[in-house]
Amino acid sequence: MAQNYSKKSASKRQEKQPKSAFPVFVSGFILGIIACQVLPFLLKESAQNGISGDQIIDIKTPAVPDFQFPNLLKGIEESDAIYLIQVSSFKNEADAESLKVKLMLLNFEVFTEVYEKSTDDIWHRVVVGPFANKRESSQARRKLTDNNYDSLLLKIDKT
């Protein structure tokens, strides 16, 4: 004889379904809110009761750092050197003179220098300067960089 198994399997499924976690979530949430409200007061009272007059620590403001290194080097300049800035070099003298005029319009002291290589190549250097110290030369290099000119710092000893 045939048996009806559908009723038994349906009742087993209903028994195995887990209970809702919603009541547990709500109770945990409420306990968390209460703990957040009460806990600061409890900690504040225990901190006040736990410190006696002998245990009070004198908190001092930190000392302001004194950076003396830049001031130590401020007055020291190399007086036995001249600084020049080479902006470019050309084989063609007309190109060198054209750049020289452009740099003069930027209010630089500019001159061209002829440089002869050992292979009988003649180059025309475009040089800005001379400058008495590194500070002046670095200001000039910054101005050249702002106007899209690459440069090379040259230090020439007077001795």
Image (tube, rainbow, N blue to C red):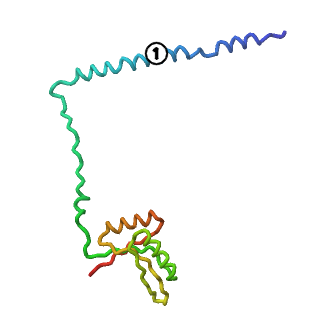
Nearer to us in this view, 103 or 30: 103
**Residue 95's x, y, as percent?**
51, 78
Figure disc tally: 1
Nearer to us in this view, 50 or 120: 120
The structure residue drawn at horizontal position 33% and vertical position 78%, both measured from the top left corner, is 156
In the picture, which quadrant includes the N terminus? Answer: top right
Tell me: 42 left or right of 123: left
Disc 1 residue type (three-letter): Ile
**Residue 33's x, y, as percent?**
43, 18
Residue under circle 1?
30
Tell me: 54 left or right of 121: left
In the picture, residue 54 is in which quadrant? top left
In the picture, which quadrant includes the C terminus? Answer: bottom left
In the picture, residue 109 is in which quadrant? bottom left
**Residue 47's x, y, as percent?**
26, 23
Nearer to us in this view, 5 or 59: 59
The structure residue drawn at horizontal position 48% and vertical position 86%, both measured from the top left corner, is 122
Seen in the picture, residue 125 relative to 56 is either above or below; the reply is below
